[in-house]
Amino acid sequence: MSSLNPRVVLVSRESEYAALLAKHGTRGQAAFFLSARGQDIAEPEARDALLSDAIQFAKASIPSDWSFAHVTRDDLSRFLFSANDIVVPIGQDGLVANLAKYLDGQPVIGVTPDPSVSEGVLTRHSAAHLPALLKRVAHGDADVEARTMVEAQTGEGQSLLALNELFIGHRSHQSARYVLRADGAEEFQSSSGVIVATGTGLTGWAKSIMAATQRAYNIAPSDHRAAFFAREPWPSRTSGNDIAAGEIAQGNHLSVLSRINEGGVIFADGIEDDFLSFDWGTEATIHLAERKLSLVF
C-alpha cells in the first residue's frame, strides 16, 4: 500500500429478501407469495439481516481518517478502482469471482455474513475479523495469496478475464460446434460447450464435471495451470471426443475456433450478460492471465 491512507471499497449484491420486496412491493405480499408455494419468508429475511449487520459492522470497522465507498455487484462495471484501495466483498464466494476481473492487484478481504453456511473458499472471514485485517493490510503485513486467473482473447481484439472459469459455447447451452486445438492436436467437436477452470474454479462448476466424467485435476489456486473440459462431446462421423479434457500450462494456450452460426458466447464466472461474441469464424485463445487476484487469508 502507498503512504496515503487507503480507501476501503465494500462490495455487496442485492439479497433475495430485497429482490422479493422489489418485486412484490411489501413484506406482506412477498410473504403471501412464498406461503402459497409452501415457503417461509423468515429464511431470506434472516439472511438479509445478517448481510445488513455485516455491512454496518464493516463500515464501523473503517478508521475515521480513511475513506470508503460502497458499490453493488451490478455497478462494478461503472466503478473506478484505484491502486490504493482495500476491497471488501461481503457475501458468497461467487461475489469475489464476479469482482476479480475489475481489479489489478488490490488486496481483497472476502467476508461472509454467515460463516455457518459459507463454503469459505473466497469469503473466508467473518466481519469480526475486519478491524485487525484492515490494519494489517494497510501496514503490508497481511498474508496474501496470488490466485491465478485465465483470459480469453479473440481476433477482434477483445478479452475477458475469469477467476473461476470461462464458458465457451452457445448462449443457450445447446449444441455448440467448434474446432479445438490443444498441445498440437486438433479436433472438430460438437458439445454443450467448453469450460476452462483455474485451481479456484475446480472447487465450483468444474468440480461437478470432474465428478461426472472421472477426469480429475489437482491444481492449487496459485498454480500457474488451468484445466479445460469439453462438456459431453459427441462422437459422430464428423465430430470427435478424443480431446475431452486437458491442462493449460504457463506459456501454452488453448485455441477454439467457432463453427456456431449465431448465439456463440464466451462468458466468465457465471455472468452471462457480460460476454464476448463467439459466432462463426471467431477464434478464441485462452491462456493464463498476467493479472492475479490478491486474496487476503
Image: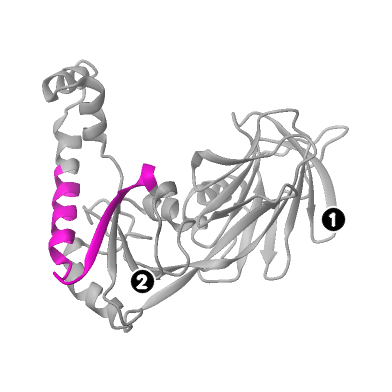
Q: Is residue 183 left or right of residue 91?
A: right
Single out the mark in the foreground, 1 or 2.
2
Q: Quadrant of residue 10?
A: bottom left
62 in relation to 159, above or below: below
Q: Are marks 1 and 2 in contact (CB under 8 Å)?
A: no
Q: Position of residue 125 (x, y in %)?
A: 26, 64
- Give the magenta part as a residue range: 49-75
Q: Amino acid at mark 1?
A: Ala
Q: Position of residue 122 (x, y in %)?
A: 37, 60
Q: Residue at x 51, y 67 (%)?
A: 292
Query: Which residue is at the front of the view, 47 or 23?
Result: 23
Q: Is residue 121 left or right of residue 116?
A: right
Tag 1 secondary structure: strand
Considering the image in quadrants, where does the C terminus appear? Answer: bottom left
Residue under pointer 1: 185
134 in relation to 216, above or below: below
Q: Residue at x 16, y 71 (%)?
A: 63
Q: Amino acid at mark 2?
A: Asn
Residue under pointer 2: 84
Q: Residue at x 42, y 54 (%)?
A: 99
The local crowd at label 1, few if under 14, some if 14 to 19, many if 20 or more residues have their Cα within 10 Å, is few
